[in-house]
Amino acid sequence: MNHLVTIHPLTTLDVDDANLVFETAIRGAFQDEGLDVLHDDFWDEVNHKKRLLQVVLQQNHNQDETMFFLLAKREDTVVGTISFAPCGEIIRKGTNQELADIGELGTLYILPELQGQGIGSALIQALIGELQRRGLEKFCLDSGYKHAQQRWKRKFGKPHTVLQDYWGEGADHMIWLCDVKDFAAQ
């Protein structure tokens, strides 16, 4: 069996597979964080990601590229996603608009059974390459998931901003600001 993963821009043919990745990976993240009981929050998160796909497809149709999705595929199956878009509300408000003009790396989800195999790193590298191609020098990202925060600290270093107790006592939200050149493939 071929385990080669390739990275592709989003197409309409990929939407159902990408939506399945969202549901599966977000469910896994909620379970890892002990948030299984928050069914409405889970579906809010999944449906928000599904809407982002539609927005990107519509803007691509209009030749506007302020947002984009890249997908990791094994053969013809989507196994991971990543997006770039204007930064979200938590980043804007959490940094008092300091990062409002910086685009956000987001929607990085890998099927749980394939996590830890370098797919996320490959998606990040592809996104960094696209940012370089577009002449963008910085990006930000954020996370409220404790497990993801540990991975981001290892990959991106100390967060730019920590919103303490944002999600409740002991549940911080972290925001990173990164220079594209620091993460570009050498």
Image (cartoon, rainbow, N blue to C red):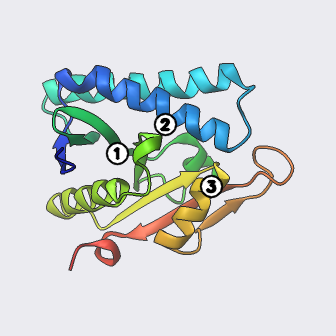
Three-letter amino acid code at the position of disc 2: Ala
Q: Position of residue 177 (x, y in %)?
A: 48, 66
Question: Label 3: which residue?
Answer: 147
**Residue marked by disc 2:** 25
Q: Which residue is mark 1?
A: 82
The CA span between labels 3 and 2 is 13 Å
* Residue depicted at 34% across the width and 77% down the height: 182
Which class describes the residues within 10 Å of circle 2: few (<14), some (14-19), or many (20+)? many
Q: Nearer the viewer, residue 61 or 172?
A: 172
Q: Mark 1, residues whose alpha carbon is within 10 Å: few (<14), some, or many (≥20)?
A: many
Name the residue: 56% across, 50% down.
91
The amino acid on which the numbered mark 1 sits, given as a three-letter code, is Ile
Q: Looking at the image, is 40 positioned above or below residue 157?
A: above
Q: Which of the 4 image quadrants contains residue 181?
A: bottom left
Residue 159: percent from left, percent from top:
59, 68
Q: Name the one closer to the observer, 156 or 13.
A: 13
Structural distance between the alpha carbons of marks 2 and 1: 12 Å
* Front disc: 3 or 1: 3
Residue sitting nearer the eye, 69 or 31: 31
Badge 3 or badge 1: first in the primary sequence: 1
Looking at numbered disc 3 in the image, what kind of residue is underneath it?
Answer: His
Q: CA distance from mark 3 to mark 1?
A: 18 Å
Quarter occupied by residue 175: bottom right
Where does the image place residue 87, in percent across and percent down from the top left? 45, 47
